[in-house]
Image: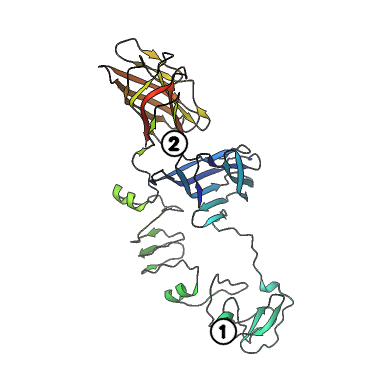
Amino acid sequence: MIVFNTSNRSLECILGGVVTTNQLPYVIHYVNISRDNQEIFNSTNGLTNSTSTVTLLAAPQSGARRSIQSLSVFNADTATATITIRLNDNGTTRQIVKVDLAVGDHLIYTSAAGWYVLSASGSIKSTASAVNLNDLGDVVLTTPATGAALIYDGAQWVDGQLDLADGDARTGILPIGNGGTGNTTGTATTNANLTGHVTSVGNAAVLGSFNLSQLNTALSDANVATGGGTCTGTDSGTNTGDQTNISGNAATVTTNANLTGHVTSTGNAAVLGSFTLAQLNTAISDANLGITLATRQSAAGTAVDFTGIPAGVKRITVMFVGVSTNYTGLSNFLIQIGDVDGFETTGYLGASNNFNAAGVNFTTGFGIVNEGTVPDFHGSLILSLQNTATFTWVASGVFSQGDTIRSIVSSGSKSLSAELTQVRITTVNGTDGFDAGTINISYE
């Protein structure tokens, strides 16, 4: 499990060279864990940037944690790519994994299985090499006794006796029948219990006949359903019954199995099925539904920042309760938004009006007119994502002053260069200080 438990730790990636044609896409599923241990499931995605560092997952807010459930990087380029995944601990980087990905490979991490690489054909890659008995030219068995076995004693292959009553000698040893000579055995028959991966090397075409119970018992890594049902056809047909694990090119799959965790369709399936909202909330473990309330902050200093807003957020509400400033520089309130590159201080379009005076235009943020040290402001400003391609946000808000019958309206728009990750509440001059009230945000 990969967990970030401080506000200065994040996950990064960098490639070993410039891509030939395409950057590598990535997808991350993670859990936000608040100070009071409330878990919010979320996800983010993006692209690498050749030899420039890309932040895969930003650091959590102060006092919160982030736990990575799964991570996938796909080599969509036309050449092998070397990718490094590393931890950034307050500017100090620690390499976690470095892998050469062939074209079509996936680098995958899960909290249950750790790191591994899937080839373009969907098989797990391994650096281990298998021993092929056909390559052991120096091994010759001449009329071995009944029950003889080819045994590796740690230094060489020997013709030894196999005692099937000895449980320690059953795993990984294949008894050789009398019909075989040299490196090729005509018929191999055994009643030994086989555990682990059972592999046939050579011309063997048939493993034998087994019932479902025997397969589940004999093969430790068998992925066989324990329920009923039938599978018919070679590459197509209909699978019915209570199957829990189905693979291949089956045209139709019907199942009553309970699906938990990530439900993934690989192949030509276009429709998952019809579900109610209650069923989806129950079945999908990383559903991110509802509104998340951030940690409320006291209005103090010259700026109040909310950072670590997760990817995919489309609506943010900024809320004031009794907020005021010392008004030493006669400055208005200002709400600014930002992405991974920092807060944006230019390019805003909008205005604010208190209905008792002329309105004021703002270009450095979403403004809220302020007329003194006494007024305490109450209300909210809603930020809504208007265009996901240009990261354009529109703002609309209404506030009131606690000491008089007066309302203030504010509105505007602003486009960012990337997804919004942070919000700042400050003043136009940046020096007037907050002296009362609390501020919070919610996002969804």
| Residue denoted by label 1 | 166
Residue 342 image point, x, y percent: 51, 29
Measure the alpha-carbon separation of dots 1 and 2: 61 Å
**Which circle marks residue 311 in the picture?**
none
Residue 91 image point, x, y percent: 59, 38
For residue 64, side relative to residue 359 (left or right): right
Q: Is residue 207 above or below residue 38?
A: below
Residue 117 image point, x, y percent: 57, 54
Q: Residue 332 versus residue 382: which sits nearer the camera?
A: 332
The kind of residue tagged 1 is Asp
| Residue denoted by label 2 | 309
Q: Is residue 291 above or below residue 279?
A: above
Q: Residue 432 versus residue 293: which sits nearer the camera?
A: 432
What residue is rendered at 35% in x and 65% in y? 242
The kind of residue tagged 2 is Ile
Badge 2, how many Cα within 10 Å: few under 14, some, many 20+? many
Residue 441 image point, x, y percent: 37, 32
What residue is rendered at 43% in x and 60% in y? 250
Q: Which structural element holds mark 2?
A: loop
Can you say which quadrant of the picture contains the C terminus? Answer: top left
Q: Is residue 276 visible?
A: no
For residue 54, side relative to residue 229 (left or right): right
Q: Is residue 316 above or below residue 194?
A: above
Q: Earlier in the sequence, mark 1 or mark 2?
A: 1
Q: Is residue 288 visible?
A: yes
Q: Is residue 421 above or below residue 125?
A: above
